[in-house]
Amino acid sequence: MAEATVTHQASAPAAESFQTGRVLTVAGGHLIHDIFTSFLAPLLPLIINKLGLSLTLAGSLASFQQFPGLINPFLGVLADRGSLRWLAILAPTLTAAAMSMIGVAPTYIVLVILLLVTGISSAFWHVPMPVVIARVSGRRVGQGMSFFMLGGELARSIGPVIAIGAVALWGLEGTWRLIPVGVAASAVIYWRLRSVTTRSISCSNGSWAESWREIRRVMLPIAGILAAKGFMTAALTTFLPTFLSSEGADLWLAGGALSLLELAGAVGVLASGTVSDRLGRRNVLGFVLLIAPVLMLVFLAIRGWLMLPLLLALGLTALSTNPVMMALVQEYSRDHPATANGIYMALSFAGQSLIIFVVGALADRWGLRATYQACALIGFASLPFVLLLPKGK
């Protein structure tokens, strides 16, 4: 990750080339960090039973994990003006400690505190790293973002299996034994960063107002896309194990289905950004956002083993849009990249936290199956916002 730090003084050829080793280093750090952030969904059925939570309160847990994303613009300004090196180094340890303790938490309030800590730590990691990726990807920013997001999607595929395996070995209250993994990750990242500063990539002092003027042409349509597709994402990634459990699946099948979905999402994010470099950001977003709601409705209409290929297709589409939108943000924020990325992350994380809460409340009122149907229909509302995106850089 440290090797990815570059400045405007870099030579022109280096700035234009796709620096594979540096891209993969940052993506690997993303993988390790996000394995721990994915623990909540597969363990949620057990936590609901342990603490006697309603689906509304259960959904609010994921909201609290996302809510600290509101600080992302502040962190973006800091990243443009100085260094977030130590915050990024500590993020895997903080996240691992908080998420590995959720099985031990005796009350809802303790769970909320742990998830807020996780959200803050996640912000420390996710604000500066996409900016680094953009600068070491040369002209292939979409492909670089795909590799970065691949680390996160692989983590969300591997994470549920690790969480369920830890429960099988040690019980729900024994998952704290995974904390040393996060500590080791921070140690490795420190070793790679020991002689390199992570000062701002941008030479600008960066302000929210200036950043907003640069990126509002893409940020307003992206905000609409995030809101509309967020209902599908919340239903699939937060409540899929709970939904399948309510349909009669056991814990291993429910958690394994989430891993399958996220694994397909990893393939989707790797492909979407790369393809958008060639076919255009709008074209790729339009196709994916049209297909994903249709697939979700078909998923709800079938039973048995046919659900598995539908989950694969849903992962390939519904979870694949982030690299394309992050590439757009970086392409339209040349002078204030970290601040712009912070604004995007705030919209994404904070908006998703609110949507998760709403989905949980709807599930309490209507049931999970009816809520899934509503979320799929809301997904179609993202298509008009794609048309509002600029056609070229």
Image (spheres, rainbow, N blue to C red):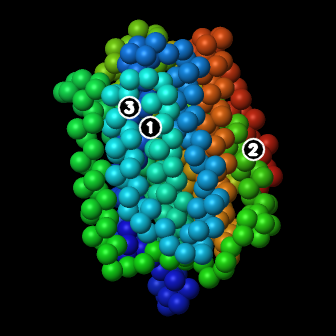
Whether tag 2 and tag 3 are in contact, CB under 8 A, the answer is no
Identity of the residue drawn at 60% across and 75% down: 81
Position of residue 153 relative to residue 166, above or below, is below
Q: What percent of the width, then of the height, locates residue 171?
A: 24, 23
Q: At numbered mark 1, what does the secondary structure look like: helix, strand or loop?
A: helix
Return the residue found at the far top: 248
Whether tag 1 and tag 3 are in contact, CB under 8 A, the answer is yes
Q: Is residue 235 left or right of residue 48?
A: right
Q: At numbered mark 2, what does the secondary structure look like: helix, strand or loop?
A: helix
Identity of the residue drawn at 64% across and 49% down: 70
Q: Nearer the viewer, mark 2 or mark 1?
A: 1
The amino acid at mark 1 is Leu
Position of residue 324 relative to residue 199, above or below, is above
- Characterize the local packing of mark 3: few (<14), some (14-19) or many (20 or more) Cα atoms within 10 angstroms: many
* Among numbered discs 2 and 1, the one appearing first in the sequence: 1
* Among numbered discs 2 and 3, the one appearing first in the sequence: 3
